[in-house]
Amino acid sequence: MSFEKIISVPGMPGLYKMVAQMRNGGFIVEGLSDNKRIPVSSTQRIVMLKDVAIYTQEDDMPLYVAFKKMKEDDASSSSITTKSEPADLKAVLKKVLPAYDEERVHISDIRKIFSWYNLLKDLVGTPESEAVMNPPVESVEEPIAEENEEVKGVKTPKKRAVKKTIDNETE
């Protein structure tokens, strides 16, 4: 399972793995905690976990990077539950991510971060998830052809003449 296929559905607790896409544009998702499969309509909002970031003092930190830092200090990160006191939650997050913005990151966000981390801590740092979050960059060494320049061996489609029929009506 890759980090890229994990989603959150606002209004529904937990995280989900995308299993299949339906014909109407929706998805079949499977809960990570209970392995139940449910349909998600195309009108429902979904949040890709790879697009989530945490506010910091300098710049936003992708959630995956925050999870890697939490994995380095797994003893304190795993000891926190979502029912812990707000002061304890803030203290542990400050220890793990000292640059997080205390004004913009609310307690409900911190609870969600620790809840998600406890679901995904086995996935963080695996080679498969590293490949998804840090794709290899390929350099292009070939010159790009100009739009007006004709490339050898490539045929451009010919424009076809369109016949217009004009009805000549006499008045």
Image (spheres, rainbow, N blue to C red):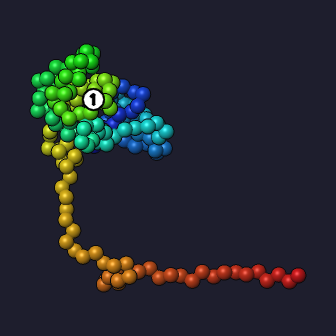
Give the mark count: 1
Locate residue 45, reporting x and y percent: 44, 37
Q: In which quarter of the image is the C terminus?
A: bottom right
Establish if 139 lies above or below 4: below
Residue 142 point in image, percent of width and height: 22, 74
| Residue 19 percent coordinates (x, y) | 34, 39
Which residue is drawn at the image coordinates 33% and 79% (left, top)? 146
| Residue 81 visible somewhere in the drawing | no
Look at the image and tell me whether residue 75 can be seen: yes
Residue at 37% in and 38% down: 47
Callout 1: SS = loop
In the displayed structure, would residue 169 be above or below residue 23?
below
Image quarter of the N terminus: top left
Check disc 1 and report the residue beneath it: 102
Q: Is residue 105 above or below residue 130?
A: above
- Which residue is at a point 27% across and 18% down the rendered structure image? 86
Q: Report the front residue among 11 and 104.
A: 104
Of 80 and 90, which appears nearest the observer? 90
* 163 versus 80 height, above or below: below
Residue 34: which quarter of the image?
Answer: top left
Identify residue type, mark 1. Glu
In screen coordinates, is 48 left or right of 97?
right
